[in-house]
Image (spheres, rainbow, N blue to C red):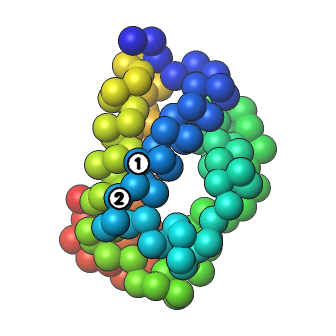
Amino acid sequence: MGDIQTREDLLFLMTTFYKKLLADSRINFIFIEVAKIDLMTHIPIITDFWEQNILGTGSYKNNVLQVHKDLNAQHQLSLEHFEVWLKHFEETIASNYAGENAEKMKTRALSIANVMKIKLGTHNIL
């Protein structure tokens, strides 16, 4: 297994990850019914986010915290939602990549989730 090195690696990860999320009834309704995301639009945007965070390139310009604050206003994100999201995220990475960038991505996801939980008022940091 190689490390995450390109935007194509991140596109593959995000596509694989969202397939898992959308198949999980504990969390899929947030994406389907609440956020009503269009994967064709969302996957390149979230790939931009991770490309900027992991590879130092990319063009993500949104405020990721505000996006989740708006979502949380529509439906309260719970500790379980964060746990399910992180479990699928970490498993998707671990099943496909190994190396410094893979580890950095898992660590950043955990850090971002913890900050979001604090800012959104979801207690119990992971």
1 and 2 marks in contact (CB < 8 Å): yes
Q: Residue tagged by mark 2?
A: 24
Taking the spot 47% from the left edge, 25% from the top edge, the residue there is 101
Residue 86 as seen in the image, left or right of residue 2? left
> What x and y, as percent, mark residue 29?
45, 72
Q: How many marks?
A: 2
Location of the C terminus by quadrant is bottom left
Q: Secondary structure at mark 1?
A: helix
x and y, in percent, of residue 119 in the image: 44, 75
Determine which quarter of the picture holds residue 41.
bottom right
Q: Give SS at disc 2.
A: loop
Category of crowding for the residue at label 2, using alpha-carbon neighbours closer than 10 angstroms: few (below 14), some (14–19), many (at least 20): some
Q: Is residue 28 above or below residue 52?
A: below
Q: Which residue is mark 1?
A: 20
Position of 15 relative to 30 (above/below)? above
Quarter of the image that includes the N terminus: top left
Asked if residue 45 can be seen in this view, the reply is no
Crowdedness of circle 1 by 10 Å Cα count: few (<14), some, many (20+)?
A: some
Q: Residue at x 49, y 81 (%)?
A: 72
- Tell me the CA gap for discs 1 and 2: 6 Å
Q: Residue at x 58, y 19 (%)?
A: 5
Q: Is residue 6 left or right of residue 93?
A: right
Q: Give the left or right position of residue 78, taking residue 29 as reference.
A: left
Displayed quadrant of residue 113: bottom left
Q: Quadrant of residue 71?
A: bottom right
Asked if one can make out residue 87 in the rendered structure from this viewpoint, the answer is: yes
Dot 2 amino acid type: Asp
In the rendering, at what x and y percent does residue 78 appear?
32, 76
Residue at the (47%, 72%) spot, across then down: 30
Q: Is residue 61 left or right of residue 18?
A: right
